[in-house]
């Protein structure tokens, strides 16, 4: 019989990290993600792991940088204001080609904002939130099961591509409880970490760095990073297509907003409206091809976000030229989560 | 014939980029000698910082991770926790450690991380061109304190060796200088002691080494060397501020 648990999304992240072989966690308390450090501070000592509650987000991302540089699987988690503080370290990790999983159970802003569900960190996550023109893998779970599965996937992707990955969740999927099947770690072929610093032993010196001053060195390094992003686009795009085959209107949303949109779509279908959903699971790489394919037939698109319009820009760049892209969104904050009825009304307006 | 002096194996046979009269090269050598002494080169992971010491990997024949400005103690924490059998040290300047990285050094020290920190204090930001540092002496003119450091506006220079010695997590803290043969011999002794703390798993060890920066002080090498032993050592007193195990 398949084992099923009833857990919070944040706990699912922690459980997946353990199953993925992560034994090093560095973080700082912030709502609504504190269940993750609480869970791991309890479990890691029993597993010979290391849990450090750092003095700041800045320190915790740099502890992750240090641990990852030695070749171990390691992670940090936080929420939006804390993720802003981590951007320096994320840029250095991207530049140094270091793996590392960063979980953002995002909250509303700007500034201290609030602790409600939010999708206003989309730009920061997918466009390279720090300096220097880089990207990281960004995965957007829409359920407790995906909090688990995508965290596990993140650990494999960072090792394969030697770059950081972010699980971009929100307080809805982080805080809610749902049934979870705790899948086993998949047997993935992973490259050996020859680059990791472990002490040179009898071999050659190894250096993990992001400073390249020699003539042409940094340009070559950036082209190498760029090729990785192209590889990601070719091989790692993930999305969910729901009733898209016969759709006259395509709704697109990610994360918890996609759950609400799905309910609205089923309500629309009961009324005879042919509406489908394309839910990007990888926000970076963005599933451009999937949008181009669906909009070759379906010309009306409605993007729904819990912000005033961020992912919609990537959708506009990906759809067929003659597709019309509408948008409905509300800035995050207490009481701004749209209802299925509200989205149904928008579906009818855009149909 | 007997060879009585040679290059430490932990140090590469290359020329450094350091200015004439700078003490970084000498301090590098002492650190390499201590590494050789305890035979830790092969299991050492050095953490480079931002500033004149950023090219650590160019001079030491060891594995190196480069840290963002000021974050070396946090990076070293991650390294050491993940690889507790490795020998881990950071090498940081005064802007790096005593300004932008103050939180990281205080908390790594307070946790008693089993690492060694080599802190080079030359009272200025060397690489960026001689701006005022947290260790710049009162009255000292720099490119961003053209009228001299004003204690009422800029605060007084921070004494890191004394400050860190107060923390429970710190096992060893000393301030040394390499401006004279006598001081150099003592500096070598203290650096070895700091390394021994880590080799024996006895906790966080800290060395503050005073250094000359002739280029940014606008002095010749001799005058800069002289300043280390007089004006600087008058304020930053040499000595051992903590030695918990009496090693």
Image: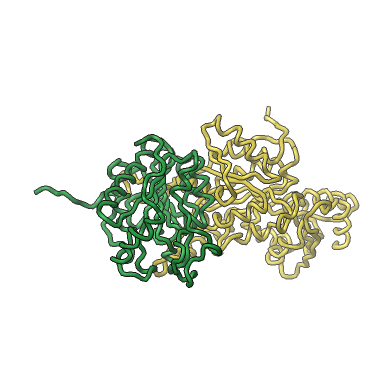
Q: Position of residue A228 (x, y in %)?
A: 52, 58
Residue B4 or residue B158, whichever sits in front: B158
Instruction: Locate residue A71 relative to residue A75 in the image: left or right.
Output: left
Q: Position of residue A99 (x, y in %)?
A: 52, 49
Q: Which chain is green?
A: B
Residue A84 or residue A166, whichever sits in front: A84
Residue B193 or residue A119, whichever sits in front: B193
Instruction: Locate residue B75 relative to residue A38 in the image: left or right.
Output: left
Q: Which chain is yellow?
A: A
Q: Quadrant of the C terminus of chain A?
A: bottom right
Question: Going 53% across and 60% down the picture, which residue do you hit?
Answer: B155
Question: Going 51% across and 40% down the picture, which residue do you hit?
Answer: B111
Q: Position of residue B200 (x, y in %)?
A: 37, 35
Up the image or down, A134 lies above or below B112; here it is below
Q: How is the image coloured?
A: by chain
Q: Is residue B222 visible?
A: yes
Q: Position of residue B233 (x, y in %)?
A: 37, 56
Question: Going 88% across and 52% down the picture, which residue do you hit?
Answer: A341
């Amino acid at each position: 019989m398949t084992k099923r648990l009833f857990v919070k999304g944040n706990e699912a992240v922690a459980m997946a990290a353990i199953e993925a072989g992560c034994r090093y966690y560095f973080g700082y308390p912030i709502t609504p993600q504190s269940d993750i450090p609480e869970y791991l501070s309890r479990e890691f000592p029993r597993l010979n792991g290391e849990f450090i509650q750092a003095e700041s987000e800045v320190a915790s991302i740099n502890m992750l940088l240090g641990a990852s540089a030695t070749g171990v699987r390691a992670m940090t988690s936080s929420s939006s204001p804390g993720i802003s503080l981590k951007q320096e370290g994320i840029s250095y990790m991207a530049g140094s080609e270091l793996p590392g999983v960063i979980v953002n159970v995002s909250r509303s802003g700007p500034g201290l904002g609030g602790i409600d569900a939010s999708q206003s960190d989309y730009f920061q996550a997918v466009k390279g939130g720090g300096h220097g023109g880089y990207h990281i893998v960004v995965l957007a779970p829409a359920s407790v099961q995906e909090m688990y599965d995508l965290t596990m996937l993140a650990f494999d992707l960072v090792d394969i591509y030697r770059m950081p990955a972010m699980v971009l969740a929100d307080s809805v999927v982080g805080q809610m409880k749902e049934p979870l099947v705790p899948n086993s770690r998949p047997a993935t072929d992973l490259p050996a970490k020859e680059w990791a610093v472990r002490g040179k032993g009898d071999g050659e010196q190894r250096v993990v760095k992001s400073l390249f001053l020699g003539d042409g060195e940094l340009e070559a390094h950036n082209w190498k990073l760029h090729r990785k992003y192209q590889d990601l686009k070719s091989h790692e795009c993930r999305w969910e297509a729901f009733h898209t085959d016969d759709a006259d209107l395509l709704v697109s949303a990610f994360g918890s907003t996609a759950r609400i949109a799905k309910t609205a779509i089923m309500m629309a279908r009961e009324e005879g409206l042919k509406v489908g959903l394309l839910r990007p699971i990888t926000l970076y790489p963005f599933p451009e091809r999937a949008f181009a394919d669906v909009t070759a037939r379906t010309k009306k698109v409605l993007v729904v976000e819990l912000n005033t319009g961020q992912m919609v820009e990537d959708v506009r760049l990906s759809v067929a030229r003659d597709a019309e892209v509408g948008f409905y969104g509300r800035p995050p904050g207490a009481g701004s989560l749209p209802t299925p009825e509200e989205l149904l009304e928008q579906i009818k307006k855009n149909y | 014939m007997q060879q009585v002096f040679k290059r430490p194996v932990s140090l590469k046979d290359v020329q450094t980029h350091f200015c004439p009269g700078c003490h970084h090269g000498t301090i590098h050598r002492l650190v390499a000698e201590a590494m050789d002494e305890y035979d830790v080169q092969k299991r050492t992971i050095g953490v480079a910082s931002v500033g004149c010491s950023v090219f650590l990997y160019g001079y030491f024949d060891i594995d190196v991770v480069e840290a963002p400005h000021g974050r070396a103690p946090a990076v070293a924490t991650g390294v050491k926790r993940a690889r507790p059998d490795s020998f881990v040290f950071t090498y940081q300047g005064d802007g790096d450690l005593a300004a932008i990285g103050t939180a990281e050094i205080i908390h790594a020290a307070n946790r008693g991380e089993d690492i060694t920190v080599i802190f080079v204090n030359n009272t200025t930001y060397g690489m960026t061109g001689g701006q005022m540092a947290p260790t710049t002496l009162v009255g000292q003119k720099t490119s961003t304190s053209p009228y001299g450091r004003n204690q009422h506006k800029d605060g007084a220079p921070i004494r890191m060796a004394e400050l860190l010695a107060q923390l429970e997590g710190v096992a060893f803290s000393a301030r040394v200088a390499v401006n004279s043969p006598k001081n150099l011999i003592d500096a070598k002794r203290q650096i070895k002691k700091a390394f021994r703390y880590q080799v024996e798993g006895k906790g966080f060890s800290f060395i503050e080494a005073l250094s000359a920066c002739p280029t940014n002080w606008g002095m010749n090498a001799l005058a800069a060397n002289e300043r280390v032993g007089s004006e600087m050592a008058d304020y930053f007193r040499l000595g051992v501020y903590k030695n918990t195990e009496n090693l």
